[in-house]
Amino acid sequence: MLYSDKVIKDTDMNIWKYIYIRFFKIRRRIIGRDGADEFAAMLFVASFDVLLFFGIMILTDKLVDKILSTKYEPFFFAFYILGMFTIGWFRNRSMCKDGAFERIKKEVENEPKKLKWGLLSILYMIFVVLFFLFSCYIGKYGFNL
């Protein structure tokens, strides 16, 4: 790297990259080729980030006794929307621009531990959905189980 003493590999695999390429391939197999394949796969990955963000926002609102959603409702709504668009913008910049898609695709295809990354990606998706559902439950009924 230019500004670092440490050498960091450019080809670090992560769950988001694996989900991105796998969803891209599944979508292409089901729907066929169209112009929005890369962007649709990026939106699929970003939707999990948005669910995490919404869950954290719901738990934060519950932690402060729902003051954010009652007294400051327009600002709270704006924060939801701003967070959602920021996550989408960040994922678009990191996964779709400047040839990133081809680089990520090559990296995932050359990954030797596909089973490990497949299991981790499924566990991540399940965790995110369960976390969001848990947050919604806690936000509605409180901590009294």
Image: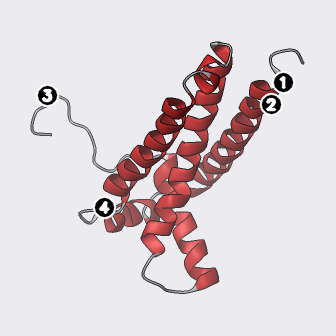
Local secondary structure at mark 3: loop
Q: Is residue 13 visible?
A: no
Q: Which residue is mark 4?
A: 100
Residues marked 2 and 1 touching at CB (< 8 Å) = yes
Q: At x 46% / y 54%, what residue is drawn?
A: 17
Q: Position of residue 104 (x, y in %)?
A: 38, 60
Q: At x 43% / y 41%, what residue is drawn?
A: 82
Q: Earlier in the sequence, mark 2 or mark 4?
A: 4
Query: Which disc number belongs to residue 67?
Result: none
Foreground mark, 1 or 4, reads 1
Question: In the rendered structure, which amino acid carries the disc numbered 1?
Answer: Tyr
Question: In the rendered structure, which amino acid carries the disc numbered 4?
Answer: Ala
Q: Earlier in the sequence, mark 2 or mark 3?
A: 3
Q: Quadrant of residue 137?
A: top right
Q: Which residue is mark 2?
A: 137
Q: Earlier in the sequence, mark 1 or mark 4?
A: 4
Spatial CA distance of label 1 from label 4 is 43 Å
Spatial CA distance of label 4 from label 3 is 24 Å
Q: Which residue is mark 1?
A: 141
Q: Earlier in the sequence, mark 4 or mark 3?
A: 3
Name above or below for residue 113 compared with residue 71: below
Q: Position of residue 43 (x, y in %)?
A: 50, 59
Q: Quadrant of residue 92?
A: bottom left
Question: In the rendered structure, which amino acid carries the disc numbered 2?
Answer: Tyr
Q: Position of residue 35 (x, y in %)?
A: 42, 82
Q: Earlier in the sequence, mark 1 or mark 3?
A: 3
